[in-house]
Image (cartoon, helix red, strand yellow):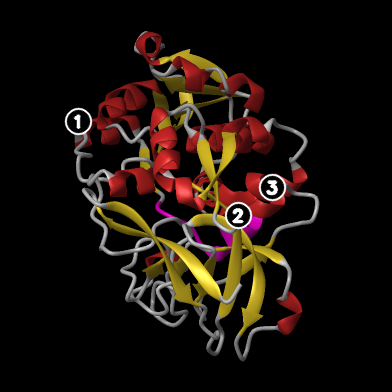
Amino acid sequence: MSKARVAIFRGVDLGFELEERALPEPGPGEALVEIEWATICGSDLHSIRGRREVPVPSVLGHEAVGRVVAVGEGRNPTWLGRRVTWTLADSCGTCPACTRWRLPQKCGSLFKYGHAPIDSGSGLNGCYASHILLRAGTPWVEVPAGLEPVVAAPVNCALATMVAAVGGLPRPGELAVVQGAGLLGIYSTALLREAGWKRVLVVDRNPQRLARVAAFGGEPVEAGSASRMGGGVADVVIEVAGDPSAVPDAIRWLRPGGHYELVGMVHPDSRMDLTAETLIRKCLTLHGTHNYAPSHLEQAVRFLAAHRESFPWHSLFSPVLPLESLGEAMSLAESGRWCRVVVAPGA
């Protein structure tokens, strides 16, 4: 293939337009990857409906796996032909966030795939395309041969983020509560159980989502009945629901000295009904996790490879749709029938 096929997002009212673009030669440190499978993240749905600001025109999509087809000077040519996943962000490696603070995901010159204008670099900077050009500061990880590539597609967003969140929790205890049974909640449940947490309750108002929870080691709890749960019983609560109305319940459930991990409310409508007195009197810890470091992506791939037979990962994914049906795929993703809808850009 001498050209890339790209689904360009023109705006909320204009949708997507398929185009062909010339394949670039990778520059120093860069790599050209042919994308095999991509999945639709919730942030992509926010973008196409105007709930999240995104530059247009742009190429959306940041969850994917693909094969390295060309590398620039400084990249090891032995990677050619290997299936990889990559960090969703490119960082400089020299600023305080990248060095002293050990938060490369908060780099002062951060670039995020699937969130940039098409005139930034080569234009092949999102995953709803047959190819993507990885920048020089982008780490990648090989996808093991025994791991299904479709199952690995969201590793570089949802799973790596939850590896970062769960990795910062106190040591495993008696009870953890997860607010939200989407893909972040399912990943949280599996990670917590494998880390040694004795019980993981997963709260959601959607029965279809809750039906998946038990297969991943959690106990489903309907949101309506969750309000009747006893107070001061949970060691940890993880918020992946994106709903600020869930906060008061979480604070009530937490025992004195408990930990509240906030992940899902990455949007402006996230003002919390919370007093400092409540935090102080219960000696609570609140912590936010946004994106992840390269080491978390490595851990995420290892976790999925080690537990590929432990959980029914395939049940989380839709049948595969071609890039030409991206609009249909977005509608299917909004229906909530699947945790992730799969697109095959190269088909």
Pointer 2 local density, CA inside 10 Å: few below 14, some 14–19, many at least 20 = few
Q: Residue at x 55, y 17 (%)?
A: 211
Residue 131 lies, in percent from the top left, at 54, 67
N-terminal-most mark, 3 or 2: 3
| Part of the protein shown in magenta | 290-299
Q: Nearer the viewer, mark 3 or mark 2?
A: 2
Q: Amino acid at mark 2?
A: Ala
Mark 3 Cα-neighbour bin, 10 Å: few <14, some 14–19, many ≥20: some
Q: For this view, does 293 lie left or right of residue 141?
A: left
Q: Mark 1 and mark 2: span between their CA atoms?
A: 48 Å
Identify which amino acid the numbered label 3 is placed on: Phe
Vertical position of residue 85 compared to residue 119: above or below:
above
Q: What is the C-alpha distance between the residues marked 3 and 2?
A: 29 Å
What secondary structure predominates along the stretch shown in magenta? helix
Q: Nearer the viewer, residue 260 or 208?
A: 208
**Residue 347 image label:** 2
The type of residue carrying mark 1 is: Asp
Q: Residues within 10 Å of mark 1 (few under 14, many from 20)?
A: few
For residue 67, side relative to residue 329 (left or right): right
**In the image, residue 323 above or below residue 114:** above
Q: Is residue 29 above or below residue 316?
A: below
Q: CA distance from mark 1 to mark 3?
A: 36 Å
